[in-house]
Image: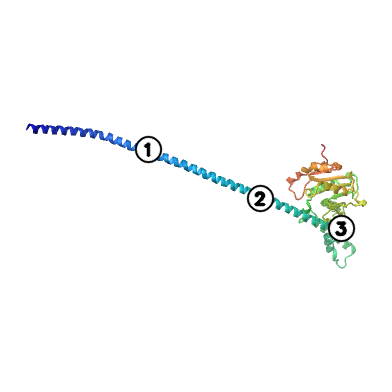
Amino acid sequence: MWEQYRNMHLSREYASQLRMASAEYAEEMPTTKGMKEDRLGSGKKKGRRKKRIESDENEHEEEELQSEIGLHEKGEDDEKGRGRRRVRKGRTVDQLETRQNTVERKVVEGKKEREKDRNRGADGGAKEERKLCEEQTHEEPKGEDAESRHERSEGAKRRSSSERSMFADGFKERRDLEQYFWSENTVMQLKEALRPTSWQTQVGHVCCLAVPSLAHAFYYSADEGGGGGRIEALLDIDTRFEYLPGFRFFDLCHPVGSESADDDFRIVVFDPPFFYIPLQVLFEAVVVAVQGNLEAKLLLGFLRREERALLSVFAPFRLRRTRFVLEYANVKPNKWRNYALYSNIDLPGIKRITS
C-alpha cells in the first residue's frame, strides 16, 4: 500500500511538474515565436536586400549596356552626320557650279545680244521704234492737208516715245546689259544741274554715256511740250533708244571714237555696269568717248564699296565723292545708300565732299 501511495504521490508531483513546465512553455512560446518571426523577417529582409542588390547590379549592367549602345548609335550618327555634311558639301559644290554655269550662260547671251545690237548699229538695220512710228503715220486720211499730217505725225511720235519711256509701265530693263535706270527724281535733278547757264557751256556738249533716261529727259522735257527739246549725245548699246536724235551706238567693251566736231563733249554723265566689265575697260571707254581729253568733266555713278578701286583707276580725272543721292527706279530705297555719284566738278545740287 505504501508503494501504491508513493507512486500516486510521484504521479501528482510529476503532474505538478508537468503543469509547471507547461506554464513555463506557454510563457516562453510568444517570445520564441517572436524570435522566430524576427529571424524569418530578417531573412526576408536579407532576401529583399539581396534582390535589391541584384536589381541594382542588373540596372547598372543595363545602364552600361545602354551607354555602350548609345555610344555606338552616336558613332553611327556621327558617321551619318559626316555623311550628311559630305552630301551638303557636294550639293553646295553642285549649286556653285550650276550658278557659275548660269552666270556664264547669261554672259554669253549678253555677248550675243550686244553682237546683234552692234550689227544693227553698224549696218543701219531695221529699227523697231521707227517702224512703229511709220506704221502709225503710214495711212493718211483723204482730204488732209500738209499741216494736219505734220501735227498727226508729231503726235504719233510723242505717243510712241512716251510708250518707249523707261518710266512707262511695262518697259523692261535689259539685265543682260546690267541695265538699271535712275529714278525720275534723280534724272530731273541732274537735268536741272546740267542747265547750260549753270556751267557755262552750250546745248550739245553733254554726253550721256549709258544713261538713256537722262537723254530722254533732255529731249522730251515738259517745258518743250514733249519732243523737240535739248538734243544731247547718247552713247549706248541698246538700240531701243535710236528714236532719240542724239543716239549713237557705243559698246563699252569695244569703244569706237568719233571724229565729228559735234562730239566735242564738255561733260560726261556715266552710269556704267558694276560687275561684268572691269574698271580699266570702263576707263578706256570714257577716254575714247572724250577723244582723249582728260580735262573733261565727268559725273560717274558707282558702288561705294568699290570706291578705292574706282578712284585709283580713274585717277587722271581726279574724281571725288559727292553728297548727291543716287536713286534707282527698280532698287529698294534702303539700298540707295550703297551707291554714290563721283565728280570732278561742282554743280547746283551736286557738291563734292572735301577730305
Amino acid type of disc 3? Ala
Q: How is the image coloured?
A: rainbow
Q: Could you say which is closer to the camera, residue 299 or residue 280?
A: 280
Question: Taking 342 as reference, is 10 left or right?
Answer: left
Of 303 and 45, which appears nearest the observer? 45
- Crowd band around label 3 with a 10 angstrom C-alpha radius: few (<14), some (14–19), many (20+): few
Secondary structure at badge 2 equals helix
Instruction: Residue type at mark 1: give it.
Output: Lys
Q: Residue at x 16, y 32 (%)?
A: 16
For the point 61% across and 48% down, the residue is: 83
Camera-side residue: 97 or 336?
A: 97
**Along the polypeptide, which appears first: circle 2 or circle 1?**
1
Q: Which mark is residue 122?
A: 3
Q: Residues within 10 Å of mark 2 (few under 14, many from 20)?
A: few
Between tags 1 and 3, which lies in front? Answer: 1
x, y (%) of residue 58?
A: 44, 42
Label 1 neighbour load within 10 Å: few <14, some 14-19, many 20+: few
Of label 2 and label 3, which has the lower sequence position?
A: 2
Q: Which quarter shows the C terminus?
A: top right
Q: Are marks 1 and 3 in contact (CB under 8 Å)?
A: no
Image coords of residue 180 (percent x, y): 78, 51
Quadrant for the N terminus, please: top left
Q: Marks 2 and 3, how far apart in space?
A: 47 Å
Q: Mark 1 sits on what residue?
A: 46
Which residue corresponds to the image point at 38% horizontal and 39% vertical from the top-left? 48
The earlier-in-sequence mark between 1 and 3 is: 1
Which mark identifies residue 56? none
Q: Amino acid at mark 2?
A: Gly
| Residue occupied by mark 2 | 90
Q: Determine the secondary structure under disc 3.
A: helix
